[in-house]
């Protein structure tokens, strides 16, 4: 294992960056089957479907969102990612620089395009069409940050995960926050067993927890315990408007959402905002309970804007909301 340079960053995100193109649908409907699962978005087949508007939003993705959130909250952050030699890649780097996220670990790959996702926006929620390019992943000398925030990577990234684990095991003081993405969950928990074991925190939503565990278990506390059994020191499960849940093997806590000032515009990036803000609070030296009070505030702001980045708050803005929180805005013991 090569020796990496000394610490320069508080948080380094590792994960694919993408450009989101939002398409706001007008004529669509949702249909729920009798199996109790999520509703399906339905459009007329072989028809021309009108839409209201489209929005182009570069430099998003779980790890990129986390790096931007950390930067806005006052930490030194960087991102390890890949882009194509194209306009979209240039746009992504421009946004990261504007957000004061260090871009020295952004690799330009002339053989691939920058990742692009299409977000079908209907009502206040979205369905995302995802495609990860076949990038060649490698770990650069990124120093010894306080935290690494690992999230969505392409399906050809298994060897890269092993490289990351070796790096983290060589530097045991570096903490790992893991928010599995689509292809990481599809790889199966056995393939990424060492990543789960090395994680200080594992973040996922309720449906993702069930997918990772390959279970229909519906009880949140049981899901938290089952996630913890994979190896992380802390499991955190978010459940949308129902709040978020924390478990470290000793204490189980529930945290309610921060009250929305008005109905959400759309919900892209809410989970990323929660996870990134919780991790940033810990990197700032806060307690678990204070981090849980911080974490729901950024999602509240994000869902009032289009896309995952626009609504992310500065520390001053976040603390302003916290000062106005209701008296019962506190973590509660989960029974």
Image (tube, grey):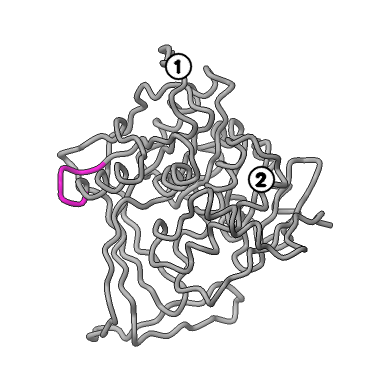
Give left or right: position of 242 versus 249: left
Please, is residue 42 above or below residue 322 in the view? below
Q: Which residue is mark 1?
A: 6
- Establish if 51 lies above or below 145: below
Q: Quadrant of residue 41?
A: bottom left
Residue at 29% across, 82% down:
52
Circle on res. 235: 2
| Magenta part of the chain | 83-88
319 part of magenta stretch: no
Looking at the image, which residue is at 30% across and 73% down? 23
What is the x, y in percent for residue 87?
A: 16, 50
- State which quadrant residue 251 falls in: top right
Of mark 1 and mark 2, the one earlier in the sequence is 1
Q: Residues within 10 Å of mark 2 (few under 14, many from 20)?
A: many
Residue 65 relative to residue 333: left or right:
left
Pick out the residue farthest to the right: 335
């Amino acid at each position: 294992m090569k020796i990496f340079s000394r610490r320069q960053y508080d948080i380094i995100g590792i994960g694919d960056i993408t450009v989101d193109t939002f398409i706001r649908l007008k004529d669509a409907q949702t249909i729920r089957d009798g199996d109790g699962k999520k509703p399906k978005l339905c459009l007329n087949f072989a028809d021309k479907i009108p839409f209201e508007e489209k929005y182009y939003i570069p430099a998003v993705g779980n790890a990129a969102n986390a790096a931007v959130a950390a930067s806005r909250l006052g930490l030194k952050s960087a991102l390890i990612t890949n882009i194509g030699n194209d306009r979209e890649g240039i746009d992504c780097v421009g946004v990261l620089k504007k957000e004061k996220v260090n871009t020295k670990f952004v690799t330009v790959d002339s053989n691939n395009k920058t990742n692009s996702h299409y977000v079908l926006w209907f009502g206040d929620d979205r369905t995302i069409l995802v495609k990860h390019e076949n990038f060649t992943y490698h770990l650069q000398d990124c120093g010894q940050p306080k935290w690494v925030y690992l999230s969505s990577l392409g399906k050809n990234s298994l060897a890269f995960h092993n490289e990351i684990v070796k790096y983290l095991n060589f530097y045991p003081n570096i903490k790992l926050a893991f928010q599995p993405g689509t292809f990481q969950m599809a790889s199966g928990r056995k393939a990424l067993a060492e990543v789960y074991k090395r994680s200080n925190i594992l973040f996922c939503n309720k449906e993702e927890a069930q997918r990772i565990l390959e279970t229909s278990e519906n009880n949140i506390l049981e899901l938290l315990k089952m996630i913890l059994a994979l190896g992380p020191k802390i499991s955190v499960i978010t459940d949308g408007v129902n709040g978020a849940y924390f478990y470290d093997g000793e204490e189980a806590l529930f945290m309610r959402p921060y009250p929305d000032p008005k109905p959400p515009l759309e919900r892209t990036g809410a989970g990323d905002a929660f996870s990134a803000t919780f991790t940033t609070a810990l990197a700032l030296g806060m307690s678990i309970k204070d981090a849980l009070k911080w974490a729901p505030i950024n999602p509240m702001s994000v869902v009032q804007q289009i896309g995952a980045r626009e609504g992310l708050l500065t520390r001053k803005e976040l603390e302003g909301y916290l000062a106005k929180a209701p008296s019962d805005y506190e973590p509660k013991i989960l029974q």
